[in-house]
Structure formats: structure tokens, C-alpha cells
Image: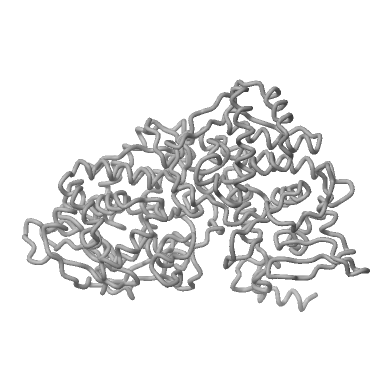
């Protein structure tokens, strides 16, 4: 014992608890290919200091919104010695902070964006593209401290950019609050495989073959490299990157040009000195730096001596004023490629007139030459971008309107339907990217509708599959999809292979007149019908909440809904093609988008297989006419031994006879092979837990059916 105690001080961990992966190996280190379920249990209440009873939306409604905006406006010109404002105005700095908080959004999986305040945490707080934004958040801390629980960091990071634009004479379209903070990094978001900042291993043959669902062109960037693809100062190649990246963020060409021009109307880029003199990012900084990164040893390291991106100079003559200066300069001059003091590629106007030069950031009489990045040059070198740029140059009012709308979309596209927006500046106009739905009737006779559904001749499987296909498009990441709107009857969803178009058409043709007869929306009828199918099969009661509406084609941006197509759905044993990740990993991803726990995912899969729901014959092992836990019993049956027959398929053979008694997919067997999922499956397979299985299945089912009811 004495020897043990003598060695305690040398122990690399405290009291036996692993606190740092650098001093102890993890399960993932030992078994890197093991399915990691942490995506389904992140943001647990244990990590939230506010407690389970805190309701941010209620707190926001108590906010003195006018006073908050006044304080933010005052902050814009309250320059601090520890981080002085360029031109005496923090507006451009805060616009960049807001842009980069919201700009991580990507439409492929709805992840990223400003809806959670994630810029406070790794990796975003330490991305090269977010250099020195740690100072912007510190400047905001006194205001956050003052208004406390009534304003989340997520909302504050977004609202501040709006106030910044308004303080410099720009037009904004509105603001909606209601974003709730997270309290640790969003570990579920895949940002790429690269191991070094600014690496680029995410393309195949062309710049359009960017790895799905990524949008940024390099690790650690929000959008594109301002110097050009991988630093290549070719404006036309840069235009390819810009178009592909912005389209993956659900922005068209006009919105892209408006955002570029409007954002670069303000402020400057920073590349005053040698980048080697800039210290590590916040997550790699010293303890005594208190979370601040990028400490710069070039002269004063701040103000006129700041080095961030390496690009150096203002975009316009008046960097703290909304005007048409960006296009005035871009079209007025020919431009030559040169280098910043930090060695970055930039473009300078040839033979610039003194009147078009800008003031130095320190307020001195010194004049500096405005610059453009390679990405800016793309706005006049690419034919389509040039045409749009010319229109905005000749009609500044159209630029102002287009920028205000595109900026609003940038800040709010991950918030979902407008009904979730809070505050006095929520615009009345319905915008198509908000996926508007006219509210449905809540007062129809549910029991009469159920009776008609039961008499329709549709099977339990048809009813359940259709309801699941409708509701399971929901994405917690950006609150899109779901059953509300009944968009499953519209293109493109009615043609998705996973939705069994022929069967879907039959079910909808049967349910539509029933819905009309009972004064219910088709959306409500589809969901209720799924519940009726479960009730007919199990004898249990399935909760139902009415009020969904039916969206029209005019309310639906069909192209944007392509991103919601399930490329794999483990719940239905469906995989559209071969992917770099396993089917079970894609099932976890789908479960996360649906906000399901590991137990909820498990019970749903087992229930669906019992109901005969599988895109193939794999996983269908029961002939029970009642929803039960029989699938789990057969999954864990030790009288069966499994053999692999293809990369994703397996045969189960009777141990004694060698006869094939069942087949399975990876998304079936993972519930027996993965130790965590097996532990859950064992609970549901117990003889005394059939009722628990049924109860939990209905709870999980209802959670998905009502996920989009806000």
C-alpha cells in the first residue's frame, strides 16, 4: 500500500479518471472501427448549467430589446486599447463575426450555422478562418453579462451583426430570436478528413466533386480561400469554388454576389506582418492567455499591426459606411496581382486616384490603397457574376434590397419555420426558403377519420411506411422536413426510391378523399393513418395531435428539398448506393437528425422489422400479427450462427443443422454486435419487457411524428 501511495503523485491521471486523451488511450483508440454512439447522447442535460426547467424562449420575451440594441450600437464606437477598433468602429469586425457564425451552414445535412452559439467552442473557435474573432466575443461579454439569461450567445452573435450594419447606414430585413445555446462542442459535425489546417483532400476529379455534405473548400475555412483555390490567384477558378460552395449553402448567384459585395463594403482584411509571428489558436493557447489565441508578436500585434488572414487592406474608400464603393472601385479600375506584407495574394487597382484611397485604420492622415481578393475579382471575371455585379452597380437600391434579404437568409436559414422566430423585428413576409405551410384545421372529428382509415383497405405496413416516409424527413439540425405540409405528395419526395413511389401513390389516392370528407389536411391524415396502423396491429393507443397543413407547390422550393432525400435509412433497411461510411453509421446520422436516443433508435428498428418493414427481405424474421418484442428475441438467439455473404449481407444458420433460417443486413446485426446497442436490445428481448417494448415504441414513434410541431 505504501508503494502505491508513493506513486500517486506520478500517476498521469487524477484519481483514476481519464481527463485527457493525450495521457490515456480511449476505446476509440483501441477499436477505431467500432460504432461510436456518442452522437446520440451529446448535449445531455448534465452539460447544461441552466438546468432542465430553464425556458430560453420565455426568458427572451422578457428582454428589453430596444435597450439591448442601443447598447450594441454604442459598443460599435467604444474602442478599447486592448483591441482597438479599425477606423474607430467595430462594425466590420462584428459583421465578420456574425457572418462566420452563420456561414458554416450547409444544406446537405442542415448542420452548421449560427443556431447554437457553436462559434464559442472547438473547432470553430480555432479555425484559421475565424482568426481573432475570439476578441469580438470578448468585446461582447459585458453586454452578455448585463442581459444574462434573456439573450443567448447564439442570438447575440447574430443580432450584433445586424446592429453593426444598421450603425453604418446599411439596410437589414429583420431579426428573429430564439436560438438556444449549446454547452460543449458539436462533435457530431463532420468537417472533413484532413489532419492539417487548410489541407484540401475533399475533391475527386473536378472542383464540383466536393465531398458530400461538405461546403467549404478547405479544412478550417468557412467558404472559399480568398486568394483562390489552394492559394492559386485565378479568378475564374475561384468563381467555380464560390458557385459550388454557396450553392451548397442554398444560395443562388444573385444572393452570392449580393453577400460578397455587401459584406465587403465594410472593413478591411489584416495581413500586416509575418504570419510566423502569430501564436497558436485559442484551443492551443497557454493557460495564462485565458482562452485568447493568435497572440501576435509583430510590433504592437493589434490595430495597424494586426495579422489575421494575411490578406491586407480595405475593400472600399469608406470602410465604415454603406455605399456602392465596392462596385465603384471594382468596375472603375484595372487590377494587378500583388502581395500583402504577410505574403498573401491580393489585387491592387492600377493608377488609383488619391480620392479613391482609404484612411489608415488608426485614424491618421495616412492613405492606403484599397485591395480586392481573388474571390472579389471573380465577381467581374466570371460572366454570370459580372452580369449580376453590373446590375447592382448601376442600381444601388437593388443591391441594398438583395443584400438585406440574402443576409437575413444567411442568419436564419437554420432556424426552420418562421413560427419559431421571436422578437419585434420578425418580418411578416413568408419566404420560400422558410418552407411555409398554411395552418391546418384542428377541429375535425379524429375518431370519424380513424374509422374511415380503418375501412380503407390499406394494410398496417402501407400506413406505417407512408407516415414514416413523410415524418422522417425532419432534420433537427435546421428544423426542415417533417410531416407538416404533406410535401411527400409533391416533387421531389413523391419520386424518391426509398418512399416506394408506386405504393405511395396508391396510399395517397386512398387517403386524399378520406381527408377531404372529414375536413382534415392530408398531412394530419397521413400521420393519423400511421398511428391507426399501429393501433390495429398492437391494440395499444397511439397519441395524435392535429393541426398540420398541406403546403402548395408555390410554397415549396422543390430543388432545395433534394437535400432531404434519405440516401440511407436503416429504419427501413434501405441503402441507395455504396458509400464511404457504413450503413450503420448512416443510420446513426439519420437517428441524430431525428433527435432520437440510442434506445429510441433501437426500439423503432425492432418494431419496424416486426411489422415487416425492410427494403429487402433481410431482417424480416417474424410472422407475428401483433407488434411485439419477438424480433429482439430472434436477434439474440444463440442457436443461430451468422456468416457474411456480401459486404453488407449475412445469413443466419441453425447451429445444429446448418440450415439458413434468416438473413440480415449490417443495420440489423449491429444491434447484436455492438456492445452498447446489444445492452439495449437485451432489455427489449426480456420475457418481462414486451409491454415496455410496445410503450417505448409508441413514444419514439410519436416523437418522430410530432418533431416538426413547434
**Hey, which residue is sitting farthest bottom in the picture?**
3
> In what quadrant of the picture does the C terminus appear?
top right
Q: Residue at x 25, y 56 (%)?
A: 385
The way the protein has been coloured in the rendering is one colour
Res 616 seen here: yes
Residue 195 location in percent, x, y? 49, 73
Residue 591 location in percent, x, y? 63, 52
Q: How many marks?
A: 0
Residue 562 location in percent, x, y? 49, 50
Residue 675 location in percent, x, y? 76, 63
Q: Is residue 148 left or right of residue 324?
A: right
In this view, the residue in front, 470 or 49, is 470
Q: Is residue 512 left or right of residue 102?
A: right
Q: Residue at x 89, y 46 (%)?
A: 688
In this view, the residue in front, 573 or 46, is 573
**Hey, which residue is sitting farthest right in the picture?**
656
In this view, the residue in front, 634 or 116, is 634
In this view, the residue in front, 155 or 635, is 635
> In what quadrant of the picture does the N terminus appear?
bottom right
Q: Is residue 381 left or right of residue 54?
A: left
Q: Residue at x 19, y 54 (%)?
A: 326
**On screen, 151 above or below 602?**
above
Res 153 seen here: no
User: Within the image, what quadrant is residue 471 found in?
Assistant: top right
**On screen, 364 above or below 285?**
above
Q: Residue at x 45, y 54 (%)?
A: 106
**On screen, 170 above or below 315?**
above
User: Within the image, what quadrant is residue 696 found in?
Assistant: top right
Amino acid at each position: 500500500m505504501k508503494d502505491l501511495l508513493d506513486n500517486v503523485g506520478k500517476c498521469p491521471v487524477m484519481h483514476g479518471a481519464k481527463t485527457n486523451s493525450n495521457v490515456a488511450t480511449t476505446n476509440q483508440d483501441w477499436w477505431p472501427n467500432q460504432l461510436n454512439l456518442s452522437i446520440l447522447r451529446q448535449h445531455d442535460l448534465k452539460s447544461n448549467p441552466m438546468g432542465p426547467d430553464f425556458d430560453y424562449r420565455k426568458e427572451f420575451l422578457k428582454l428589453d430589446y430596444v435597450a439591448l440594441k442601443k447598447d450594441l450600437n454604442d459598443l460599435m464606437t467604444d474602442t478599447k486599447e486592448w483591441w482597438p477598433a479599425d477606423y474607430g468602429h467595430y462594425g466590420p469586425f462584428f459583421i465578420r463575426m456574425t457572418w462566420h457564425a452563420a456561414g458554416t451552414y450547409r444544406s446537405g445535412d442542415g448542420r452548421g450555422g449560427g443556431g447554437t452559439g457553436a462559434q464559442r467552442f472547438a473547432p470553430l473557435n480555432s479555425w484559421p478562418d475565424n482568426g481573432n474573432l475570439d476578441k469580438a466575443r470578448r468585446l461582447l461579454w459585458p453586454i452578455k453579462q448585463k442581459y444574462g439569461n434573456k439573450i443567448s450567445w447564439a442570438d447575440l452573435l447574430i443580432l450584433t451583426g445586424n446592429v453593426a450594419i444598421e450603425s453604418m447606414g446599411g439596410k437589414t430585413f429583420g431579426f428573429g430570436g430564439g436560438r438556444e445555446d449549446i454547452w460543449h462542442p458539436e462533435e457530431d459535425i463532420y468537417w472533413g478528413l484532413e489532419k492539417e489546417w487548410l489541407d484540401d483532400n475533399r475533391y475527386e476529379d473536378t472542383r464540383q466533386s466536393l465531398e458530400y455534405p461538405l461546403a467549404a473548400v478547405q479544412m478550417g475555412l468557412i467558404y472559399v480561400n480568398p486568394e483562390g483555390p489552394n492559394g492559386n490567384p485565378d479568378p475564374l477558378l475561384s468563381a467555380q469554388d464560390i458557385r459550388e460552395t454557396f450553392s451548397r449553402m442554398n444560395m443562388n448567384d444573385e444572393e452570392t454576389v449580393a453577400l460578397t459585395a455587401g459584406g465587403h463594403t465594410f472593413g478591411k482584411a489584416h495581413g500586416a506582418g509575418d504570419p510566423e509571428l502569430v501564436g497558436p489558436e485559442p484551443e492551443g493557447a497557454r493557460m495564462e492567455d485565458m482562452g485568447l489565441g493568435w497572440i501576435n508578436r509583430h510590433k504592437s500585434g493589434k490595430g495597424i499591426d494586426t495579422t489575421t488572414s494575411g490578406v491586407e487592406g480595405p475593400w472600399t474608400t469608406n470602410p465604415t459606411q454603406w455605399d456602392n464603393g465596392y462596385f465603384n472601385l471594382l468596375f472603375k479600375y484595372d487590377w494587378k496581382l500583388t502581395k500583402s506584407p504577410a505574403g498573401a495574394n491580393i489585387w491592387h487597382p492600377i493608377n488609383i486616384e488619391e480620392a479613391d484611397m482609404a484612411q489608415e485604420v488608426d485614424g491618421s492622415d495616412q492613405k492606403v490603397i484599397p485591395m480586392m481578393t481573388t474571390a472579389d475579382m471573380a465577381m467581374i471575371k466570371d460572366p454570370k457574376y459580372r452580369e449580376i455585379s453590373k446590375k447592382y452597380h448601376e442600381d444601388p437600391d437593388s443591391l441594398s434590397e438583395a443584400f438585406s434579404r440574402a443576409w437575413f437568409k444567411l442568419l436564419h436559414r437554420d432556424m426552420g419555420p418562421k413560427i419559431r422566430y421571436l422578437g419585434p423585428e420578425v418580418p411578416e413576409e413568408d419566404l420560400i426558403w422558410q418552407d411555409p405551410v398554411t395552418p391546418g384545421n384542428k377541429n375535425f372529428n379524429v375518431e370519424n377519420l380513424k374509422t374511415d382509415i380503418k375501412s380503407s383497405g390499406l394494410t398496417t405496413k402501407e400506413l406505417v411506411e407512408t407516415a414514416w416516409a413523410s415524418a422522417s424527413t425532419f432534420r433537427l439540425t435546421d428544423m426542415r422536413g417533417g410531416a407538416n405540409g404533406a410535401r411527400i405528395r409533391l416533387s421531389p419526395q413523391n419520386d424518391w426510391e426509398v418512399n416506394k413511389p408506386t405504393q405511395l401513390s396508391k396510399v395517397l389516392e386512398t387517403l386524399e378523399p378520406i381527408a377531404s370528407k372529414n375536413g382534415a389536411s392530408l398531412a394530419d391524415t397521413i400521420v393519423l393513418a400511421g398511428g391507426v396502423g399501429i393501433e390495429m396491429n398492437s391494440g395499444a393507443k397511439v397519441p395524435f395531435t392535429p393541426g398540420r397543413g398541406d403546403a402548395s407547390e408555390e410554397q415549396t422550393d422543390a430543388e432545395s428539398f433534394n437535400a432531404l432525400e434519405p440516401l440511407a435509412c436503416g429504419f427501413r433497411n434501405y441503402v441507395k448506393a455504396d458509400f464511404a461510411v457504413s450503413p450503420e453509421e448512416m443510420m446513426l446520422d439519420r437517428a441524430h437528425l431525428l433527435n432520437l436516443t440510442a434506445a429510441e433508435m433501437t426500439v423503432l428498428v425492432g418494431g419496424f422489422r416486426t411489422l415487416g418493414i425492410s427494403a429487402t427481405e433481410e431482417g424480416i424474421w417474424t410472422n407475428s400479427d401483433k407488434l411485439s418484442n419477438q424480433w429482439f428475441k430472434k436477434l439474440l438467439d444463440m442457436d443461430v450462427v451468422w456468416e457474411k455473404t456480401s459486404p453488407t449481407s449475412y445469413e443466419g444458420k441453425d447451429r445444429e443443422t446448418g440450415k439458413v433460417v434468416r438473413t440480415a443486413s449490417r443495420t440489423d446485426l449491429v444491434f447484436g454486435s455492438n456492445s452498447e446497442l446489444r445492452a439495449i436490445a437485451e432489455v427489449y428481448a426480456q420475457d418481462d419487457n414486451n409491454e415496455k417494448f410496445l410503450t417505448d415504441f409508441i413514444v419514439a414513434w410519436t416523437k418522430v411524428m410530432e418533431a416538426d410541431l413547434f
